[in-house]
Image (cartoon, coloured by chain):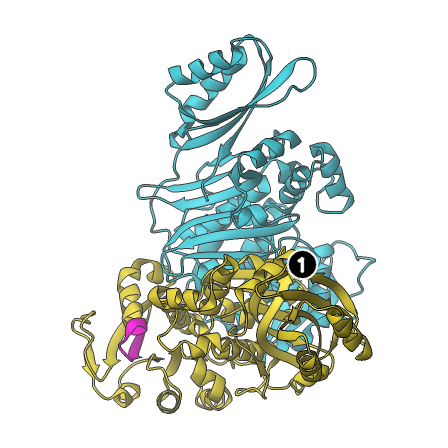
Chain colours: A cyan, B yellow
């Protein structure tokens, strides 16, 4: 049995969850031929919820890399201090396991280069969808494949909120419910503005396509502009609404983007509800792979972290772990994209308003795939629902402004349509 | 770059698919830090569809283990000759990669023991659902977890046939379609009688629970007794019909079983149609994981084989790869199971027939959850559809006989109901 000595930095929920899982599931872990020995913990203060017994706690986390250990598990969160700790650990010849997507997103290349220089590995399975094994699947099991496209819901909070809005609830109510149930942080901006999903798809793109970390700039939009009524209209048209993170290999460039989309109700991703994370990977050899699981939570994250430690014991450290950055394709400029669009246009029910909208679009050379005028809302307001043909992103801003400038138009919302 | 020298035994569809994928996807494979060099091929005859160029072909496959190679890829199929070739390769100090589920099912323990004795590994990702990465996921990424239950459709042909019957087609027609489209073999018995799925769940149980290979005897039933009308009645009751392979960890034993089931229409597995394979794994840390992908085909199998070769290059060979057989739990005797049952009973529409069936069940102490009498079929025949409460498997045979012995009963079909 190979014994790996581990030092855990940070002693919050995730760290104590890992500690507990290592103790509770010792039998299963050791069936992999590996024994994990938690040698020390770095934490400014004790955690009243978890007594680590005889394990020594260092009050300065920067003491941990100097101990007689094989692996530093970085669970302090944040970016700059985490970067410093990881680099110090690497220089001390320790492998690093982390659940910290932000630090890898912003400093991944620097960190992996340092790791290669020092003959150690930095693993981050738990940084993307917690223990759901997406990182290793992309890095290893799918390695023989051309990864054509990765699409998924990578943020549990956003998927929880949208799934609840689909059932007819308001955004604010369901955000509060998510906070009450512990899915969303007290400050939910990071989730609902799309940044969390952006970090995760950035990491996956770096694995699949060798894009840089930090990645070049890419388009990020959250879910705050969606109204519960959009789900009704989307449903009528055969769609539902999801917050999608996408990365795709094109001939001349690589797409990375994160935004809400209408997707076909019958697609796999449309049917993943609640806090679950799910991903669809299009490959040349295996075809389309689906994987879904719990994307957050103490125990799921612990599973991802421990599987990384087991992997370190099982792996041949000579082999460089990150894809070579030999794919010099640029990130596709978002302005060069074309999408079909869903338009929700709220108008005063006056003669000629439909004609002025359709002629405005015709003038811009934008075809209409379907158009529905629904029953009155309140105060003589009528919703017009449009699905356009595909057109260039560069046109969107002007078109939206022009429509909103029409005399009878009261409100406008737009959502891109994704072909899955 | 680590170079692995590989000898391929067998030169049929799968072997040439692997050869082609190694050539075509060289760029992606080498991004993993591994270069695969096909050093030699063992094949009794050339394959007119594939010219291996300069690579030497040995006419005796048993010459391959003696060559200057790191890995023998066994793609000859069958059981006894494959076993002999694998054992010879191990004794010659070569790693082995195989897609052959039958040889691992029947001789796995002998093969893995020999491999451990000789310090080499035997990998078989492609033996279960081709390239869909279920084997490595169970073995590594989910290693920190207690695997509570594995349930899945592991045979693409059966799932294709049942999905087509669900659309209203007859068994025989859809089997012929499966054969025409190349999903089913000319002799389809291995697929439709459940043996292929049984081999696969046997391998997964050995990984998850350390059960022996060959496993102790377990229950295997195929899809040949299902009628297309059963889908209509199942649908009416909120179910669909799938051919399910199950392995589950109980307190005192381990379940392994393969048979058709009614499962809830809203479940994940119910919605996987066609030749796709899909699996649901219940774990203690990550919760429920779903994975689905192409479970057959030359290219998907090639992906599984190549990912195993990459894994060999990346892995630390000191670590024994198979779970220790320290889980001495027996396989649960199928007669000790209890299931809810779906009964299709075709009766002559005479007074008292319903009463005689229900009193027969009452006499056996079997409750009825729902009962539906449908419109007449032909010739005064009426179908009665029953869903029973859960009862012991030991009772089933007697009950079926008693019902068939009732004067007005013409026909009886039963399917177990699975809670997912």
- Which residue in the rendered view is the most extreme toward the left? B54
Q: Given the image, what chain letter belongs to the residue carrying mark 1?
A: B
Q: Nearer the viewer, residue A412 or B116?
A: A412
- Which residue in the rendered view is the most extreme toward the right? A48
Q: Is residue B304 magenta?
A: no
- The picture places residue B399, in percent across and down from the top left corner, at 71, 80
Tell me which residue sits at (71%, 42%) in the image.
A185
- Which residue position holds label 1? B237
Q: Quadrant of the N terminus of chain A?
A: bottom right
Give the quarter of the image for residue B326.
Answer: bottom right
Q: Is residue A349 left or right of residue A396?
A: right
- The picture places residue A284, in percent across and down from the top left corner, at 36, 56
Q: Is residue B9 magenta?
A: yes
Q: Is residue A329 above or below residue A318?
A: above
Q: Which residues are magenta?
A: B4-15
Tell me which residue sits at (30%, 76%) in the image.
B5
């Amino acid at each position: 049995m190979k014994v790996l000595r581990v030092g855990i930095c940070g002693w919050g929920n995730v760290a104590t969850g890992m500690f507990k899982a290592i103790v509770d599931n010792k039998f299963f872990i050791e069936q992999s031929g590996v024994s994990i020995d938690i040698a020390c913990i770095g934490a400014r203060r004790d955690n009243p919820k978890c007594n680590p017994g005889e394990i020594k706690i260092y009050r300065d986390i920067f003491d941990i890399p100097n101990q007689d250990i094989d692996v530093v598990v970085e669970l302090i969160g944040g970016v700059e201090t985490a970067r410093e700790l990881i680099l110090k650990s690497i220089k001390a010849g320790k492998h690093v396991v982390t659940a910290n997507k932000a630090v890898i997103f912003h400093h991944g290349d620097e960190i992996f280069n340092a790791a290669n220089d020092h003959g150690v590995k930095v693993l981050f399975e738990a940084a993307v969808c917690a223990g759901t094994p997406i990182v290793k699947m992309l890095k290893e099991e799918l390695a023989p494949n051309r990864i054509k496209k990765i699409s998924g819901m990578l943020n549990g909070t956003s998927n929880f909120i949208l799934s609840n809005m689909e059932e007819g609830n308001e955004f604010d109510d369901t955000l509060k419910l998510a906070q009450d149930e512990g899915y969303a942080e007290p400050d939910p901006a990071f989730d609902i503005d799309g940044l969390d999903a952006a970090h995760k798809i950035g990491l996956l793109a770096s694995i699949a396509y060798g894009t840089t970390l930090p990645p070049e700039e890419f388009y990020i939009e959250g879910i705050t502009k969606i109204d519960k009524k959009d789900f009704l209209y989307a449903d009528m048209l055969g769609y539902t609404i999801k917050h999608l993170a996408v990365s795709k290999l094109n001939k001349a460039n690589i797409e990375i983007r994160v935004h809400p989309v209408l997707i076909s109700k019958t697609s796999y991703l449309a049917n993943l509800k609640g806090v679950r994370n799910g991903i669809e990977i299009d490959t040349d050899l295996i075809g389309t792979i689906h994987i879904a699981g719990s994307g957050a939570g103490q125990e799921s994250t612990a599973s991802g972290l421990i599987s990384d430690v087991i992997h370190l014991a099982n792996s041949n450290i000579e082999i460089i772990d990150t894809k070579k950055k030999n794919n010099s394709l640029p990130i596709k400029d978002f302005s060069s994209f074309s999408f079909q669009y869903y338009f929700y246009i709220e108008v005063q029910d006056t003669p000629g308003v439909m004609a002025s909208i359709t002629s405005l679009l015709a003038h811009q050379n934008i075809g209409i795939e379907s158009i529905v005028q629904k029953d009155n809302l309140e105060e003589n307001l009528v919703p017009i629902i449009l699905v356009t043909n595909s057109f260039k992103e560069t046109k969107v801003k002007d078109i939206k402004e022009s429509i909103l400038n029409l005399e009878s138009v009261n409100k406008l919302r737009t959502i891109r349509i994704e072909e899955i």
